[in-house]
Image (spheres, grey):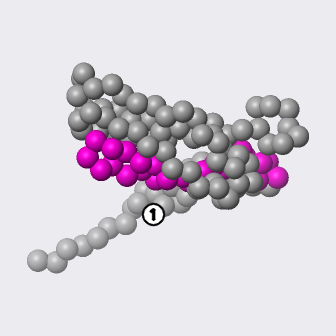
Amino acid sequence: MAIRHHRTAASTAAPALAAVLLAGLAAPAGPAAADDRRERAGASCRTEVDGSHVTAYCHNPYPRTDRVRLHVECARWWDVDADSAPVEVPATAHVELAERCWKEVRAAWISHDPLPAPGSRGR
């Protein structure tokens, strides 16, 4: 039995339509785009869970200081969730944050609060 493939206008237009839609979602070009990327730049972090202990390792490759916090949600309803104190990560610096639960860890994540660039007027 031979299988025949039929192309329709809709199936050939779909990739072009997808490209147009994705182009609209792409970041703007030019100086505004560079400023936008600079605004979002922050420390790169990874978390490791070992039993009830969570450790986060953050490195900031950008010139702007980032303030990071480790948040840990514990699995048991009676176990108190933990949030670390904010820690500033200046350019090229590494920091390590640690928190724990009494029992199992349900989730762990890092929040970022970039500090204003020197000489700027706040956020």
Q: State which region is magenta.
A: 31-58
Left or right: 79, with 34 as reference point: left
Task: State the residue in front, 27 or 48.
Answer: 48
Sort mark 1 into few (<14), some (14-19) or many (20+) by Cα contacts within 10 Å: few
Q: Residue furthest right?
A: 119
Q: Is residue 80 above or below residue 19?
A: above
Task: State the residue in front, 33 or 74.
Answer: 74
Number of numbered tags placed on the structure image:
1
- The quarter of the image holding the C terminus is top right
Q: Position of residue 7 (x, y in %)?
A: 37, 66
Task: Please tell me whether mark 1 sits on a helix, a strand or a loop.
Answer: helix
- Residue 5 picture quarter: bottom left
Q: Position of residue 84 (x, y in %)?
A: 49, 34
- Asked whether residue 23 is in view, the answer is no
Q: Position of residue 75 (x, y in %)?
A: 25, 32
Q: Residue at x 44, y 43 (%)?
A: 98
- The quarter of the image holding the N terminus is bottom left
Q: Residue at x 48, y 39 (%)?
A: 70
Task: State the residue in front, 38 or 6.
Answer: 38
Q: Is residue 33 above or below residue 75?
A: below
Q: Position of residue 118 (x, y in %)?
A: 84, 42
Left or right: 70, with 86 as reference point: left
Q: Residue at x 72, y 38 (%)?
A: 115
Disc 1 residue type? Thr
Q: Residue at x 69, y 50 (%)?
A: 90
Residue 48 among those drawn in magenta? yes
Residue 83 among those drawn in magenta? no
Q: Dot 1 corresponds to which residue?
A: 12
- Asked whether residue 104 is in view, the answer is yes
